[in-house]
Amino acid sequence: MTAVADAQRPATIGDYLLRAADFLHGLAGWRRAGVAFVAGSVSALSFAPFAIFPLLLLSIATLVLLLDGSLRTKRPHVSAAWIGWCFASGQFLFGLYWVGYAFLVDAADHAWQIPLVEFFLPGGLALFIAAATFAASFYWRPGAARIFVLTLSYACAEWLRGHILTGFPWNIPAYAWGALPGVMQSTALFGSYGLSLLTILFGASLAELANRRNSRAWHLPAAVAALFLVLWAGGIMRLALIHPPAGPPDLDQ
């Protein structure tokens, strides 16, 4: 009777999340790598000029679920690095499309270099994220612990990307909040890399919504969402103090 009742029960959002998680966990081989690449590519839409910031959060949550599946393979650490590289390659490939424009100034002499720049540059930058997922795989545990491990390793990789060899901090996670100036004001407290760490934590925590083992799994994403709401509200207040709304013109002057 219980099975029949469950079959007749309307599907909830939680049911769809569990199905999505099961689908991502079950991927293997090129399918897992392909979904990681697509997720990374979609995350590029979070940055200017599109600024659809929820896509970065959802993409990072997808990365966590893909890593859950990859760590069940025979070579989990190599698989984790590969998934991280595919994810970041997609993000950087579409996020760095503008680099090729410089080679069109004198297209007759330099256009042939566009494929080299557009593919080797994203692939090279993706090594930082591959290193992050590789390192995180050694400490990966079920539940919220893996969220914090990935957040720390991913944030450190982004910091290194922004500083090694003079750095290339293009499209670090904090920049995805460009459409919400209130959130961006929090960089006055802890900088763009601090906001990047919180952004990664926010996105990764969403993967916990599909954790069927823990009925309280929603607590972490809810807490991080509340933190961002506070940051946004505080940023709006700060902007109002710095740039108060203009009043009516003084006609006596």
Image (cartoon, helix red, strand yellow):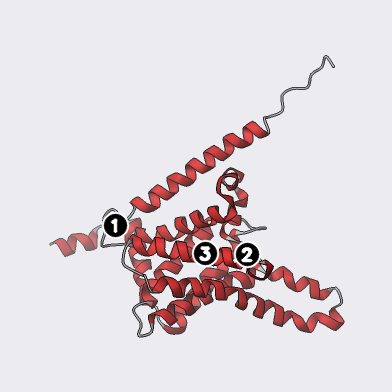
Q: Position of residue 104 (x, y in %)?
A: 82, 75
Quarter of the figure with residue 244: top right
Q: Can you tell which mark lies on residue 10?
A: 1
Q: CA distance from mark 1 to mark 2?
A: 48 Å
Which of label 1 and label 3 is nearer to you?
Answer: 3
Q: CA distance from mark 1 to mark 3?
A: 43 Å
Q: Quadrant of the C terminus?
A: top right
Q: Position of residue 238 (x, y in %)?
A: 60, 36
Residue at the (58%, 42%) spot, across then down: 182
Residue at the (66%, 66%) spot, across then down: 168
Q: Is residue 73 left or right of residue 86?
A: left
Residue at the (34%, 78%) spot, across then down: 72
Q: Can you tell which mark lies on residue 96?
A: none
Marks 1 and 3, the one that precedes in the sequence: 1
Q: Relative to residue 189, is residue 52 depicted above or below?
A: below
Q: Can you tell which mark lies on residue 156?
A: 3
Q: Which residue is mark 2?
A: 162
Please state which of residues 31 and 207 is positioned toward the viewer in this rendering.
207
Task: Assess whether mark 3 and mark 2 are in contact (beta carbons under 8 angstroms).
Answer: no
Task: Assess whether mark 3 and mark 1 are in contact (beta carbons under 8 angstroms).
Answer: no
Q: Quadrant of the N terminus?
A: bottom left
The secondary element bearing badge 1 is classed as: loop
Q: Position of residue 103 (x, y in %)?
A: 80, 75
The secondary element bearing badge 3 is classed as: helix
Marks 2 and 3, the one that precedes in the sequence: 3
Residue at the (61%, 45%) spot, across then down: 181
Mark 1: few, some, or many residues within 10 Å (few <14, many ≥20)? few
> Furthest-top residue in view?
252
- The amino acid sitting under disc 3 is Cys
Q: CA distance from mark 2 to mark 3?
A: 10 Å
- The amino acid sitting under disc 1 is Pro
